[in-house]
């Protein structure tokens, strides 16, 4: 009886460990600057809807790379593209019709 209980407990622990390994691999992938993301993952990373993200790609704001037949986005490229939009507001005032300094 005790061996059966022990065997069941070991199997449950092994299953939990496998789930934790998968979760850890996903976290490590997210922190890798050269990881590839599809459009849905990239949109979530940037913080916009998939539809808006596709529109921004069409306008050239984000540049995909081709891997085989797929278009994917590197996290480092997304970060670089986002840095362009983080210019101080006084640089943008003239373009948006705000008061000039």
Image (cartoon, rainbow, N blue to C red):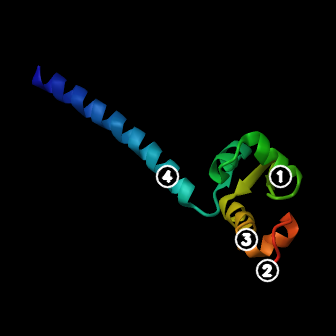
Mark 3 or 4: the one toward you: 3
Residue 30 visible in the current orientation: yes
Residues marked 1 and 4 touching at CB (< 8 Å): no
Q: Secondary structure at mark 4?
A: helix
Mark 4 or 2: the one toward you: 2
Q: CA distance from mark 2 to mark 1?
A: 33 Å
Q: Secondary structure at mark 1?
A: helix
Residue displayed at 50% across by 56% down: 28
Q: CA distance from mark 4 to mark 2?
A: 44 Å
Q: Secondary structure at mark 2?
A: loop
Residues marked 4 and 2 touching at CB (< 8 Å): no
Q: Which mark is residue 101?
A: 2
Q: Which mark is residue 57?
A: 1
Q: CA distance from mark 2 to mark 3?
A: 11 Å
Mark 2 or 3: the one toward you: 2
Residue 9: name its quadrant: top left
Residues marked 2 and 1 touching at CB (< 8 Å): no
Residue 61 picture location, percent across and down: 82, 59
Q: Which mark is residue 27?
A: 4
Q: Residues within 10 Å of mark 4 (few under 14, many from 20)?
A: few
Which callout, 1 or 3, points at the residue further toward the start of the chain? 1
């Amino acid at each position: 009886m005790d061996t059966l209980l022990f065997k069941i407990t070991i199997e449950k622990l092994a299953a939990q460990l496998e789930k934790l390994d998968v979760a850890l691999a996903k976290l490590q992938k997210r922190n890798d600057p050269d990881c590839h993301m599809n459009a849905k993952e990239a949109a979530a990373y940037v913080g916009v809807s998939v539809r808006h993200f596709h529109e921004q790609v069409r306008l050239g704001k984000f540049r995909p790379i081709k891997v085989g037949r797929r278009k994917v986005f590197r996290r480092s490229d997304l970060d670089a593209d986002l840095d362009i939009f983080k210019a101080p507001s006084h640089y943008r005032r003239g373009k948006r019709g705000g008061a000039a300094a």
